[in-house]
Image (spheres, grey):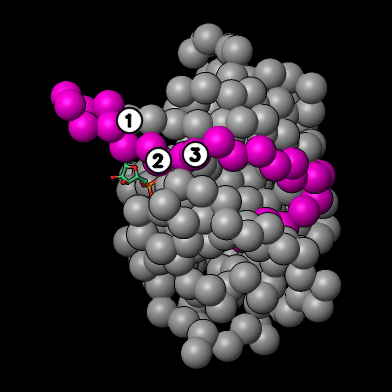
């Protein structure tokens, strides 16, 4: 699935104050691309992601996902579109504490059209031995891998990841990034990953840099690294 943005802007109005969180962005992300959206805090990364994924509306502009103009959809249509096509991962794992690993992943599977099996996905994220554990029995990295499994089990066309390693130490972060890289490769799932850590750009096919709501750079990375080879610096 490709995503095309044409002249997309987002302005938040709070009383007298206007914040131009995204300024006139135009770009296209291709199916299967691993894109890192990079920028300092406040540069508009989350706003951009939320708009691309239909979690928020743009103030102006067109967002086209594989021929569907999501910027024209009403909230009911958007909810269905997101459920059928998109996966989400955030810094917080948002797992259900009373459900086991397997049951948490089942939750993602139930809402989908062409899902993978829970067993297959737990194997891919390296959690088969943890299948029957509960979130409180897992490390942060393991919990994040459960949330990745929950997002990917529904076979999403696009995975949106907002600072997925923001709460993890370096080694654990690389493990989690490695899982995302592997899923991108084996399922050809488009991945859009937000980070403020420039080192992570090295594992992407493409790096889009934001500053003060503007796309200031959009570069192809011909020599991408394995997540395990990234050096945090
Ligand atoms: N819901 C909101 N209401 C008002 N301002 C917002 C809202 N969300 C984000 N902003 C503002 O938009 C700008 C970009 O924020 P954000 O997209 O969260 O940046 P980043 O994810 O890069 O840290 C910031 O100035 C932020 O304060
Ligand atoms: Mg953010």
Q: Is residue 34 magenta?
A: yes
Task: First in sequence, mark 1 or 2: give its number.
Answer: 1
Please report the bounds of the magenta region as a residue range.
13-37
Provide the residue designation for mark 3: 23
> Residue 39: x percent and y percent?
47, 61
SS at circle 1? strand
Mark 2 CB lies closer than 8 A to ligand 1? yes
Q: Answer with the quarter of the image where residue 2 lies.
A: top right
Provide the residue designation for mark 1: 12
Q: Nearer the viewer, residue 115 or 66?
A: 66
Identity of the residue drawn at 56% across and 78% down: 199
Q: Answer with the quarter of the image where residue 4 lies.
A: top right
Question: Quadrant where the N terminus lies?
Answer: top right
Q: Does the magenta stretch include residue 188?
A: no
The answer to whether the residue labelled 1 contacts the one labelled 2, judged by CB atoms less than 8 Å apart, is yes
Provide the residue designation for mark 2: 21
Nearer to us of marks 2 and 3 is 3
C-alpha gap between disc 3 and disc 1 = 12 Å
Identity of the residue drawn at 66% across and 76% down: 202
Q: Nearer the viewer, residue 50 or 110?
A: 50
SS at circle 3? strand
Q: Main secondary structure of the magenta part?
A: strand
Judge the density around disc 3: few (<14), some (14-19), many (≥20) Cα neighbours within 10 Å. many
Q: Name the disc covering residue 57, or none.
A: none
């Amino acid at each position: 699935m490709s995503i095309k943005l044409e002249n997309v802007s987002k302005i938040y109005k709070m009383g007298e104050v206007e914040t131009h969180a995204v300024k006139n962005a135009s770009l296209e992300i291709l199916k299967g691309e691993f894109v890192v959206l990079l920028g300092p805090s406040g540069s508009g990364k989350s706003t951009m992601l939320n708009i691309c994924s239909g979690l928020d509306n743009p103030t102006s502009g067109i967002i086209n996902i594989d021929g569907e103009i999501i910027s024209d959809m009403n909230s009911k249509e958007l909810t269905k579109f997101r459920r059928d096509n998109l996966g989400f991962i955030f810094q917080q794992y948002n797992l259900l504490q009373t459900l086991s690993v397997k049951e948490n992943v089942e939750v993602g599977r139930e809402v989908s059209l062409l899902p993978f099996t829970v067993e297959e996905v737990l194997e891919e994220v390296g959690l088969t031995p943890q299948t029957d554990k509960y979130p409180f029995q897992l490390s942060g990295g393991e919990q994040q891998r459960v949330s990745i499994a929950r997002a990917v089990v529904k076979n999403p066309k696009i995975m949106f990841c907002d600072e997925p390693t923001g709460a993890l130490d370096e080694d654990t972060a690389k493990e989690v990034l490695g899982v995302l890289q592997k899923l991108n490769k084996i399922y050809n799932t488009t991945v859009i990953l937000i980070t403020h850590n420039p080192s992570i750009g090295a594992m992407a096919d493409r790096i889009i840099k934001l500053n003060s709501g503007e796309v200031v750079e959009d570069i192809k990375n011909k020599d991408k690294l394995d997540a395990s080879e990234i050096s945090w610096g």
